[in-house]
Image (cartoon, coloured by chain):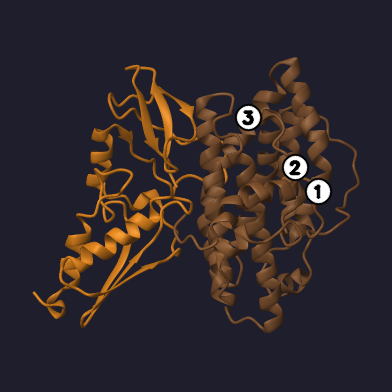
Amino acid sequence: MTTLTPIQMEAVIRKLTALADDEIILAHRDGEWTGHAPILEEDIALANIAQDELGHATLYLDLRRSLDNSDADRLAFFRGADEYTNVRLVELPKGDWAFTMLRQFLFDAYEALWLSAAQNSNYVPLAEVAAKAVREEKFHLQHTALWVERLALGTEESRLRTQNALNELWPHVAQLFAPLPGEADLVAVGILPELEKVRASWESFVLPHLTEKCDLLLPMVPAQASEGRDMHTEHLAPLLAEMQSVARQHVNAEVW
Amino acid sequence: MTASHVTPEQVWTALAAVPDPEIPVVSVTDMGMVRDVTVDGGHVTVTFTPTFSGCPALHVIRDSIGEAVRALGVEDVEVRSTLTPPWTTDWIQEGARERLRQYGIAPPAPAAASPLISLDPDPTRCPRCGSLNVRMTASFGPTLCKRLYVCDSCREPFEGFKSV
């Protein structure tokens, strides 16, 4: 099935944009380590990961363009914080290395499992994108899972920093699994995966890694995200100001 | 030669000479990126599948494909990309695997055999001495498609193609 009703199309566009926004903002935070990562290999690794995430954003925004003829560059570089629909998890400042690796691990696992489920979408263009992107996520997940383990079981200090990162990030995780307006209708007709099911598989993958393998303590936090993707922390606007500065100074530039 | 005389075989031959911009010892057809060529009168359509979605060389590859076909005297060239089926390193031609190895890049292990979501890296053989006694030193390399290794038998560092 690839014919969408106008209401479905609106909801699909909203979802594609949210998926792309998560990737763009996280890629920017990862990119902030370029030239600053603890060792050269990790500088390169994080740049690779950021590049992949931007590639996935491009796939989503290409899909959106096929529906509403929108321009990916305009969406990325000329929307303000009030229009971005990324989760708050990805916009938090980059923090230390433990924070960066743990955030990426939590997100990679979510992304890999969401994409894995989305391969079964009966909206064929989305199923195709998911089948493509999921192959790349495997490498992120291998890498960040190993880093979380290494840091959690490393020195007293690395363990403390990893636990602190988990305490800070955990309250933001629930928002990854909060459906957007209209999303339930798309799930009902088989266009999108059910987030509760993705969450269950995410928990069965992530929780044993954090607690059994890495011996970290799960913080006690409320189970549900309170506000939607239109509510951001104070950290998003400065991120966008930096990310968009060149595009906004050279509005008519054609080649990036 | 006029455009109407171009055959799909001629287009394939021309594309076999288009190098991968990041690994010039292999061509876009060696890599299995060209999925289909159709010739309809003077209109040539080439369908290719991107390797990694964030690969910065994709637009170069797209332009090179168009140029290679135009060099045959064809004016009306369309270069399409498709995501289905997704590109896999299993499509890299046998000869190209050997050229990768000689170039110092370990060719990818069969992707079909490994699960998509796994925390264990694929087995890799040193391209220089053939030993499996190798260590991955970085899971990401200078391009999206490669990782970095060191061989504990011959002590050489080398790049390995990811298996996807």
* Marks 1 and 2, how far apart at CA: 8 Å
- Residue B41: x and y in percent read 21, 83
- Judging depth in this view, the residue of A242 and A94 nearest the camera is A242
Q: Which mark is residue B39?
A: none
Q: Which mark is residue A233?
A: 1
Residue at disc 1, secondary structure = loop
Residue A18 shows in the view: yes
| Residue at x 72%, y 55% (from the top left corner) | A86
Q: Chain of mark 1?
A: A
| Residue at x 71%, y 73% (from the top left corner) | A11
Q: Chain of mark 3?
A: A
Q: Nearer the viewer, mark 1 or mark 3?
A: 1
- Residue A90: x and y in percent read 71, 46
Q: Which amino acid type corresponds to the residue marked 1 in the rendered image?
A: Thr
Q: Is residue B75 left or right of residue A37?
A: left
| Residue at x 43%, y 63% (from the top left corner) | B85
* Marks 1 and 3, how far apart at CA: 27 Å
Q: Which mark is residue A92?
A: 2
- The reply to whether callout 1 and callout 2 are in contact (CB within 8 Å) is yes
Q: Is disc 1 in the same subunit as disc 3?
A: yes
N-terminal of the pair, mark 2 or mark 3, is 2
In the figure, what tint was chain B given? orange
Q: Which amino acid type corresponds to the residue marked 3 in the rendered image?
A: Trp
- The reply to whether callout 1 and callout 3 are in contact (CB within 8 Å) is no
In the figure, what tint was chain A given? brown
N-terminal of the pair, mark 1 or mark 3, is 3
The residue that label 3 is drawn on is: A147
Mark 1 neighbour class, 10 Å CA radius: few under 14, some 14 to 19, many 20 or more: few
Q: Which amino acid type corresponds to the residue marked 2 in the rendered image?
A: Leu
- Residue A186: x and y in percent read 71, 72
